[in-house]
Amino acid sequence: MPYEGELASKSAHSDFLRNPDIKSFLGQCEYLTPPSDAEAQALANQFVELPAFTEKLPDYVVAIDGSNYESSIDDKLPSTKVGFIKIGAVLISLAKFGALRDGRFVDPFRVAALQDDNAALTFSVPSANIRWGGKTNVRDSFRAYMDMQFSGPRTRFNEADPSTSLRSTLFHLASLRPGKMGTGDPARLKLHQCPDCHAEEIELQDIPEQQKCPVCGTDVYPTDCLRIWEEVSDYQSNQIAISRLMLMLEHLLPIHYMRYLAKTPLLLSEIAFFVDGPLAIFGNPAWMHRSIMIFLQEINRKLAKLKQPPLTIIGLQKTGQVVDHLMLIDRFIPTNRLLAIDDEYRYKFILAGREPSSQGFGFETYYGQDFIFKTPSGRTFVFALPYPYASKDAAGMDFVREKVKFSNYAQLQRALMLITHLESDLYENAVVPIALAHHYTAISFQPGGRVLDLLIKNTLNQ
């Protein structure tokens, strides 16, 4: 690491250029490479041409997106940090969206009105060298403050009712976990282990009172079940833990809305949800993906009894390996084409050299199937729909084959119509809801990040 103000040598890279081991190493690496024209054309031939759409669009779209930023409290103390997370939700009436145009032009006043229906949930967490609430270390401060925010009034649909909080939604999902970690009771959940003494399978209740580990007596929190605390460090940046929390919240918040709206299921059938990124949860909270699959199937069974279509949830990917692959073959794909990415295609053309999973791609993380769609206008999208099953390992089902059959996705046509209806020129291959959600949640380094830096410095240095 250089000293402050020290400039790097202009010739330091020459050692790498002369080192034969570097060239040998690069020659042995496997990575995503552009296919030949013939190979790309063969890939494009696997896409299916779509018939005319006839599905009715929902009345509303809800889009979820998140952003995070880790701020130092002082320029002289760059290793002392606080983390910020912002999860935004934008509600769009498709009737209002359809009325945006006035002849050939878009009415700016109607666009401004369309953007009014947005809300954001903000979190802050202690990071490196920051302690809170009398805790002796960063990890316990992070745990305590995170749990307090999950159960706080800002996450409740009814501020006077703790059972409407985001933490109660987490209880609901945790109770659905398959196997010994599930309780079957939305008022109880189990922790994998105590963060202090490592006692296993500690059961907690959905109550406001502070709960203790029955073995060592230290404080334990319901949100400990997410195990994000395992990635929190006392003295280094906690960007990984902060990002993990943000990505988990992007999936938990739609479930939070659905749990509340399930009281009026007919309304749920008229709302489509857009989530930024794949329908998957990575890292220690990955167990949630199984609970989400079960939860969604419970909702869909209720809707089916009312003769309503299933939930429409669309994960839209802006970056990643599949998007990179699509960029390589895009010019070969005709318009109005669709592909469900099966494991054979993924491991052969996208995940270069990776050994295929015996249980199928994303078995421990994904709750939705990836598709590639080229619209009639020529824009391309990588999107996902929830798997139409409560479990990936149901007896007698070949999940790896079933997950890529178009006929298993009752909401597929509605999703394709929504993407086509909402595609935007604002960004490359973007849809309006996600673009607006990102607009209201993105924390830019300038000026947004700088404002947060000033807030921290002025508050902590008083």
Image: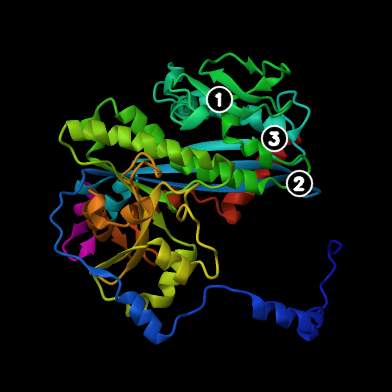
Q: Which mark is residue 236?
A: 2
Question: Neighbour class for label 1 at 10 Å: few (<14), some, many (≥20)?
Answer: many
Query: Disc 1 marks which residue?
Result: 190
Real-space CA distance between mark 3 and mark 1, rounded to the nearest whole angstrom:
37 Å
Real-space CA distance between mark 2 and mark 1, rounded to the nearest whole angstrom:
30 Å
Magenta region, residue range: 96-107
267 on left or right of 220: left
Colour scheme in use:
rainbow
Secondary structure under tag 3 reads helix
Pick whichever, 173 or 414, lies toward us.
173
Question: Neighbour class for label 3 at 10 Å: few (<14), some, many (≥20)?
Answer: few
Residue 285: tell me if it is visible.
yes
Q: Nearer the viewer, mark 3 or mark 2?
A: 2
Secondary structure under tag 2 reads loop
N-terminal label among 2 and 1: 1
Question: Residue at (73%, 18%) from the top-left corner?
Answer: 216
Query: Residue 298 is drawn in which quadrant?
Result: top left
N-terminal label among 3 and 2: 2
Examine the rendered structure and indicate whether residue 85 appears above or below residue 302. below
Q: Position of residue 310 (x, y in %)?
A: 24, 41
Question: Residue at (52%, 37%) from the top-left corner?
Answer: 122
Tell me the kind of residue under disc 1: Lys
Secondary structure under tag 1 reads strand
N-terminal label among 3 and 1: 1
Q: Nearer the viewer, mark 3 or mark 1?
A: 1
Is residue 73 on the magenta stretch? no
